[in-house]
Image (tube, rainbow, N blue to C red):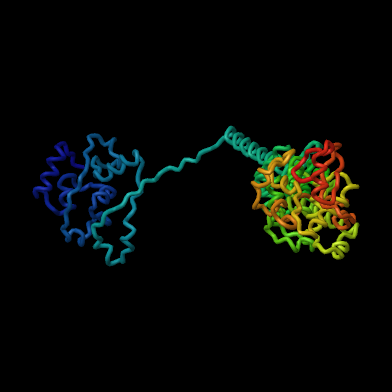
Amino acid sequence: MTENNGNWDDLYAEFEGGDISHDQNGSWKEIFGDDLPDELMEELGLDVPLNGDVHAEDAALGETFPIDATYFDEAEDDPFGDTNVIPREVQDISAYTDGELPIILEDPDYGDLDDEDEDEEEDDPRKYRAIRRVRRRRTGLLGGFMYAAFILGLATVLAFVGWMVVDDVLGLTVEEFVAEVTIPENFTIEDVANELHAQGLIQNRRIFQFFAGMFNYYDRIQPGVYQVRPADYRALIGRLNQRTGALIAVRVTLPEGLTMRQIFQRLEDAGVSTVELLTYAAENGEFAFDFLDEVPVGTMNRLEGFLFPDTYDFFLQQNPEAVIRRLLRGFDERMQMNDVYELVEESPFTLREILNIASMIERETASVEEMPRISSVIWNRLDTGMHLGIDATIQYLLDEPMEFLTTTVINAHRDSPYNTYHIIGLPYGPIANPGMAAILAALSPESTNFLFYALHIDGDRHHFTRNYAEHNAFLNTPEFAHFGVFG
């Protein structure tokens, strides 16, 4: 091989300037001689001779192109081993692959050449793809142990959470005790969950809400105050119903002569319901009793007189309509027991008018013995067309009762349908809820000709007179109790 001790850039300039022949093989032979290795000729794009001869066809082409190469001073630095020249393209690829030998791939679009086209191979660009080593990462013993620990910990947490959910839903480990659970009117399932959680009957409110919603148990729950023991979700919901007997019972005694509002106040004080809810139910509720047919729904004080005084068992926070229905059922039972419906049919009055008379009797006297005689005065006045002039009807209009009524107070309520000092006949409706003695007295008055009565000084009986002169004479005696304008 001819040694080239000159400057490669000068040599390349001579080649570009045309001083070197453009015959590729010949030009390189002028520089290196005739002993170029086949490998180098391939890299330089030169024709490799077969059996020592150069293809005539390749020589005839006469095509030349500049080759950028690097010169090595020592043969031992030559990566090919047989020459000290390496093309710059190969050098760049070698630097890119950190010195590793590349795989030189032909352009995939080049395709396979027929035998006749192989000699006329076009000068297409070549693509180089470096071989990259794939490193396999090894976790090692420590990594495997950590992974196993993670899986075990995750499984433990999931198992613990699952056990807590199952335990809460089934109530497996709850201690035995009795809780007082209050379900309000117009409650939501969230209200129920919060109350059960507050009483220690459940631990997970969200799980309970999901359970109740999934099985549509919401409709089974009713307002009230219940005595509940720990149980599974299904049993807990089943006990929050007024038919289960889990409600807390409360006994309330309603004496004779109370107004509807006074009765409702007593029920509220006992925790059965509220005055507001009971009043609304009384005026607007639908109750299947024939004796209410003459009183339209929505009428104020619609049930006054029909709430029979007695001792009742209710439940805490009971449904207001259920409370009213219980009172009306008690009234109906007592009317039937004493044949009141039949006696009403024999009288000139309706049931509500009899209750109206009975309520005035109940409010005017506390003596059962006097009731038929008081009833006779009312009947006699109704027959003669006189004003009833009963103080209790005025007291019914007042927020607070007065010990002694004045003319000013009576005249202040002149336009009221309950003011018996100014209207003729019965007041608009009953003014209280009478007991059975007053009802029977209203149906069966004593036969008298009394038109007046006044309270005696001893306070537990009345003095009856037949006319105003006798009545006025008694009012001017020391035996008169000075109670009321009319007496």
Occupied quadrant, residue 190: top right
Instruction: Tell me if residue 424 comes above or below residue 73 in the rendering.
Output: below
**In this rendering, position of residue 51 left or right of residue 239:** left
Q: Can residue 449 be seen in this snapshot?
A: yes
**In this rendering, position of residue 133 left or right of residue 196:** left
**In this rendering, position of residue 335 left or right of residue 321:** right
Q: Can residue 328 be seen in this snapshot?
A: no
Q: Residue furthest top?
A: 142
Residue 49 rendering spot, x and y as whole percentages? 25, 55
Judge by depth and name the residue closer to the eye, 265 or 3: 265
Residue visible at 28% across and 45% down in the picture:
90
Instruction: Tell me if residue 46 comes above or below residue 171 in the rendering.
Output: below
Occupied quadrant, residue 114: bottom left
Judge by depth and name the residue closer to the eye, 80 or 315: 315
Residue visible at 32% across and 60% down in the picture:
109
Q: How many marks do you count on the picture? A: 0
Judge by depth and name the residue closer to the eye, 111 or 139: 139
Q: Quadrant of the C terminus?
A: top right
Residue 162 rendering spot, x and y as whole percentages? 69, 43
Residue 311 rendering spot, x and y as whole percentages? 85, 46
Residue 66 rendering spot, x and y as whole percentages? 17, 49
Judge by depth and name the residue closer to the eye, 337 or 362: 362
Instruction: Tell me if residue 152 comes above or below residue 422 in the rendering.
Output: above
Q: Quadrant of the N terminus?
A: top left
